[in-house]
Amino acid sequence: MGLLDKIKPHTPPVRPADLALNEHGGLTIRWEDGQESNFAPRFLRAQCPCAGCVEEWTGKRTVGEAQVAADVRCRGMNPVGNYAVQLDWSDNHQTGIYSWDYLLKLRVGGPQVD
Ligand SMILES: [Zn+2]
């Protein structure tokens, strides 16, 4: 997959109706289909899709849960167009752009907190 494929705006089948940081420092997403995802902060930080966390050409993940502090928190988010959100983490990492497509993939089988 080339860089353009990764950043090309694209309409996923289900989009977030609402996004909010939750009290765990993770992300709560209410989806258009009525499902709700509560992403744990460490999980989400460890899934960061940026070039600093995943080697661009090989797709190999270089920053995962082993490299992420247990108490990492999300402290801010910025919308990116209408297809993604950029997350600002307490370990000063803020280059990760999480597209709706990517979050939708993560919601299936990802650890959830309540
Ligand atoms: Zn990253």
Image (cartoon, rainbow, N blue to C red):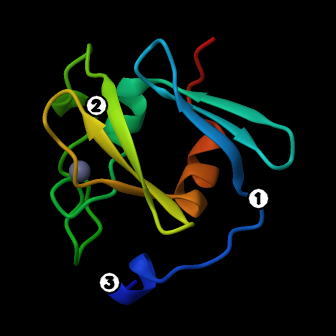
Which residue is painted at 55% across and 32% down in the image?
20
Please give left or right for residue 57 compared with residue 113 in the image: left
1 or 2: tag closer to the N-terminus: 1
Query: Mark 2 belongs to which amino acid?
Result: Glu
- Marks 1 and 2 sit apart, C-alpha to C-alpha, by 27 Å
N-term mark: 3 or 1: 3
Q: Amino acid at mark 1?
A: Val
Front residue of 100 and 48: 100
Query: What residue is disc 3 on?
Result: 3
In the rendered image, residue 83, in percent from the top left (x then y), is placed at 55, 66
User: For disc 2, does the CB lie below 8 Å from ligand 1?
Assistant: no
Residue 4 lies in quadrant: bottom left
Q: Position of residue 71 (x, y in %)?
A: 26, 13
State the mark number for residue 14: 1
Disc 1 under 8 Å from ligand 1? The reply is: no
Q: Position of residue 80 (x, y in %)?
A: 43, 63
Local packing at callout 3 (Cα closer than 10 Å; few below 14, some 14-19, many 20+) is: few
Whole-percent x and y of residue 52? Answer: 15, 57
Residue 90 position by quadrant: top left
Q: Which residue is mark 2?
A: 65
| Label 2 – label 3 distance at C-alpha | 24 Å
User: Is the C-beta separation of discs 3 and 1 under 8 Å?
Assistant: no
Q: Secondary structure at mark 3?
A: helix
Q: Left of 91 or right of it: where is 106?
A: right
Give left or right: position of 50 versus 29: left
Q: Secondary structure at mark 1?
A: loop
Relative vertical location of residue 50 with respect to residue 110 in this rendering, above or below: below
Quarter of the figure that contains the C terminus: top right
Camera-nearest residue between 82 and 92: 82
Q: Is residue 39 left or right of residue 53?
A: right
Q: Nearer the viewer, mark 3 or mark 1?
A: 1
Residue at 26 percent of width and 15 percent of height: 70
